Each structure stands twice: as structure tokens, then as C-alpha cells.
Image: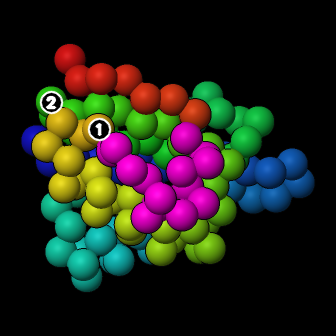
């Protein structure tokens, strides 16, 4: 099973349209171009509605992370750095997230692997 980036496709700021699905489509292209072995999928609601846009990182035998308050488009480069860190961490634990830029401040929770 590949690692997975799951983006909420219903997240939206009040008065704005959801942007998660469009961001996921953009990210899928960037992930493929970079050769990252990760699936980019969407889901309807990650229960972080107060601080859109939310996403989760998970993988078999790896830690799971939940982020919110992200900004599609402007956070894409930081997300690519985060994915690189996650893909290179055998157990998913990222010891130093500074390369992930602003996203390290958007982390809302993590759980160890099962």
C-alpha cells in the first residue's frame, strides 16, 4: 500500500467555494512530476471545518498526521517538502519539520503507526 495524502474536498472559508478538490488535482500532477510514490485522494470532511483546508498524511506502518489551516496554491511548495520528509521517514516520524515551512505550524495532530 502506498503512502496517502488525503485532502478535504468540502473545506471552505465562510462565503467561499471549497478548494480542496482543485488543489488535489494540482498536487497529483506535481507529485507525479517529482516521482513521489504517494497517492493523492480527496474525502468529504476531515472534521477540521473551522480551519480549512485540511489534509492528512498516512501510510502502512507509519505515523499519521492531520493538518489544517493550509492555503492551496501558496502552500504547495511547502507540502512537497513535507511529502519528501514523510516519504523518507521509514516510520513516518518527522524529527525536524523546518523544511516544511509554514505547514509545520498547521499540524493539528499525529498518531503513531499501529
Relative image position of residue 38 (x, y in whole percent): 23, 57
Give the labeled residue for mark 2.
61
**Residue 57 versus residue 79 in the image, above or below:** above
Residue sitting at 39 percent across and 68 percent down? 80
Q: Secondary structure at mark 2?
A: loop
Image: 30 above or below 69: below
Dot 1 corresponds to which residue?
93
In the image, what residue occupies the spot 34% across and 44% down?
Answer: 95
Q: Which residues are magenta?
A: 94-107
> Mark 2 vs mark 1: which is more N-terminal?
2
Magenta segment: does it hold 96? yes
Could you tell me which residue is drawn at 75 percent across and 58 percent down?
17
Foreground residue among 93 and 46: 93
Q: Identify whether 34 is placed above or below 65.
A: below
Among all residues in the image, which is located at the extreme top?
114
- Using the rendered view, name the quadrant where residue 60 is placed: top left
Q: Is residue 74 above or below residue 63?
A: below
Q: Residue 6 vs residue 87: left or right?
A: right
Q: Is residue 79 visible?
A: no
- Residue nearest the viewer, comparing 55 with 89: 89
Residue shown at the point (49%, 67%) measured from the top left:
78
Q: Which of the 4 quarters of the picture holds residue 26? A: bottom left
Quadrant that contains the C terminus: top left
Amino acid at each position: 500500500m502506498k503512502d496517502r495524502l488525503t485532502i478535504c474536498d468540502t473545506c471552505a472559508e465562510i462565503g467561499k467555494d471549497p478548494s480542496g478538490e482543485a488543489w488535489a488535482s494540482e498536487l497529483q500532477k506535481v507529485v507525479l512530476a517529482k516521482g513521489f510514490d504517494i497517492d493523492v485522494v480527496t474525502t468529504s470532511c476531515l472534521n477540521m471545518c473551522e480551519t480549512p483546508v485540511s489534509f492528512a498524511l498516512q501510510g502502512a506502518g507509519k505515523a499519521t498526521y492531520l493538518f489544517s489551516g493550509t492555503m492551496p496554491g501558496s502552500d504547495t511548495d511547502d507540502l512537497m517538502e513535507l511529502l519528501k520528509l514523510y516519504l523518507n521517514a521509514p516510520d513516518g516520524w518527522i524529527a525536524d519539520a523546518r523544511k516544511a515551512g509554514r505547514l509545520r505550524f498547521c499540524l493539528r495532530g499525529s498518531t503513531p503507526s499501529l
